[in-house]
Amino acid sequence: MYAIISLQDNNQYLEHHQNAEYFFQYLIDNGCEAKLGYFNQVEKAVSFVTKGSYDVLYISVFDFRYEYMSCSISLTMDFIHKVKELQPDIKVVLWGYTACYYKDVLKKYSDIEICDRIFPFDDCADEVHFRLKEKQLYKYIKMRDSFPQSEPICANPYREEMLLTSIGCTRKCSFCTDPALRIQKCWRGRSVKDIADEIKRLYQNQPFLILRFADSSFEDEDAEYYNRTKAHRSIEIAQKLIQMKLPIVFAANFRTSIYKLYSEREIAVLKEAGLSTIYLGIESFQENELHIFQKQTLQDIRLAINFVRNHGFNLDIGFINIHPYSTMEGILENAQMLYEYGFSSLSHYVHRLMIVKGTKLYDRIKEDGLLKETAADIDYYNYNFKDFRVKEFCDRVVKACSDSTGKEILNKSELYTHFFANFLNAVKNFFGEEFIEKYFRKEEYQAVMRELNRAVYELFLDLYYGKKLHTDETIQVLKKLDNIRENLEDACYEQDQTFPSFVWKPVIL
């Protein structure tokens, strides 16, 4: 009898849950007795396990880098130890990225078996080895099209639902964990019909405003399964959304090659379906850094930014401005480009590279002698800088962003450059154009956003040159945006008391 646990620090229905569902279905299909549970509290998860007659407990540890996307290692280990105290004979198995590459850390916890490259990220042809007492060998199952319908989905209080429609990625960014887990096939996707069914089920269970596709890249598809005589897979998904007529908008990750891949007609379909925000993994505005990250060219970046904005989509980006090979001149050049393009989230200016074992960039940093020895369990910043000046700058960044004011600026600047834009489009979609024109002061909002862009850039310059931080100016601008947002929310609730509340997630650096 097997227990599969998906444990998180919050209630969001994310990739972490879906991987547990696939594994659960795999066991059922192979004639095993298994039960699946989602929990955001250790006590509830422990009760679930101890009330059943389970021989083996599986818990995923896919990636601890982003604690809002999975549970913290301390929470996981607290859960495991409590289970073992009550049921010392139960076999506990960890699987996932962290279990594969951080065994030296996890092995210090007793009574834990660690599975290498376990389902479903790893496509290892015909079989997967589970390191259990019985040395059982299970055949590998391809990504399924259906979820276990009898198991409840956890409630999502954030009204931003997340959905995974594929596993893997077709690119090889040097800092990414996906290529590190890849053996053969790099991308597997669910059918469009099943994706549509899942969206319906999620919405019926708990209405939401914004749908966030969590795929590495929304336009990826399997060349062996799809062909260009059919509509692009993302367009098929968009067409299903149009047919469902749900009052939602959606956001998704795309590549900077978007300007090459989509025709004007296809962009119109995505817009009609509710596409609100496009995320691009830009990472840098310098060719040498793009080469280090194994990313696109600077020309692709410029063309993609113009393409997305010319079509009226909100644009958010992934950006890495501090890394072992950074120079102070390069950091400033990147910041100037962020300002010119109006990316007004402080997180873009000060985001540090997180390095993880198994990635090409980790190996390069190690080979170049820039990897630090650390006593920490898992330290994603255990590197030195080639330019000693960058360390001094990085130390100032960490200190400034650690106090309450710094965190507020980080989080709220991210809120108004990303989450609030989705909320605006969701309001427009929910209530109509006339409503938002009546209750939303668009010109004032745009003017204040320009103020925010300037304030964040000047705050960065204070950090860069080691000057006194002028945080008051940035806080005042953010308060103006708070007033605009709160007035619009009040109008929404007065119009319709059932309108879902808008809750935003903080940035984690």
Image (cartoon, rainbow, N blue to C red):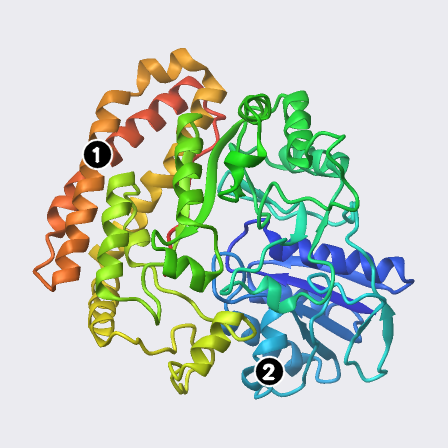
User: Which badge, 2 or 1, is on the more N-terminal residue?
Assistant: 2
Q: Quadrant of the N terminus?
A: bottom right
* In this rendering, position of residue 313 left or right of residue 172: left
Q: Is residue 504 something one can see in this rendering?
A: no
Residue at label 1?
Answer: 450
Disc 2 and disc 1: Cα gap in Å?
47 Å
For the residue marked with disc 2, what is the amino acid? Lys
Q: Is residue 281 above or below residue 484?
A: below
* In this rendering, position of residue 367 left or right of residue 472: right
Circle 1 residues within 10 Å: few <14, some 14–19, many ≥20: some
- Mark 2 and mark 1 in contact? Answer it, CB < 8 Å: no
Q: Is residue 85 something one can see in this rendering?
A: yes
* Foreground disc of the pair 2, 1: 1
- What residue is rendered at 71% in x and 33% in y? 196
Q: Quadrant of residue 355?
A: bottom left
Which numbered disc covers residue 367? Answer: none
Q: Is residue 378 above or below residue 344?
A: below
Q: Quadrant of residue 312?
A: top left
Picture coordinates of residue 106, whole percent (x, y): 58, 82
For the residue marked with disc 1, what is the amino acid? Arg
Circle 2 residues within 10 Å: few <14, some 14–19, many ≥20: some
Picture coordinates of residue 242, whole percent (x, y): 63, 22
Residue at label 2?
Answer: 103
Which residue ends up furthest to the right in the rendered image?
31
